[in-house]
Image: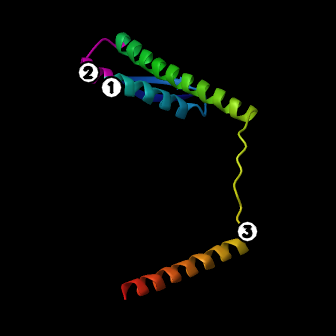
Amino acid sequence: MAEVDFTIGHKEYRLASQPGEERLLKRAAALLDTEAQQILEQAGRMPEPRLLLLAGLMLADKFNTLEDRADKAEKQLQRLQSNPAKVEVPVIPEDLKEAMAELAARAESLSEQLEERMGD
């Protein structure tokens, strides 16, 4: 079994973990430490059990918010998948594009000629 060292708030810990789970434990501890550090910045030093409780509650609140957002997104996805909106994208044939470009060029030329005549 591997041992993982980490710090939460102002205290260092060492826990045993299953092989391959060290990274997960360090990541979880880092999340808890982030919350603990915010609490310590606002409230100052406090007893370890209270700090861990507050940090855990803050993480639980964030988790609940993310879970609610995920549920809403899942419901919206299911709704869209069950009743997809039909989207039609017009495809302009290449010869029509060329004809329109030619018409635009001719119109611009006529406009320039008209401006020249009006300027006289």
- Residue named by callout 3: 93
Residues 27 and 107: in front is: 107
Cα distance between the residues tagged 2 and 3: 65 Å
Disc 2 versus disc 1: nearer the observer: 2
Disc 2 versus disc 3: nearer the observer: 3
Residues 112 and 6: in front is: 112
* Residue at screen point 40% across, 15% down: 52
Cα distance between the residues tagged 2 and 1: 9 Å
- Residue named by callout 2: 42
Farthest left residue in view: 44
Amino acid type, mark 2: Gln
Cα distance between the residues tagged 1 and 3: 62 Å
Amino acid type, mark 3: Pro
Q: Give the magenta range.
A: 39-48
Residues 53 and 42: in front is: 42
Residue 22 position within the rendered picture, expressed as x and y whole percent measured from the top left = 54, 32
Q: Earlier in the sequence, mark 2 or mark 1?
A: 1
The image's mark for residue 37 is 1
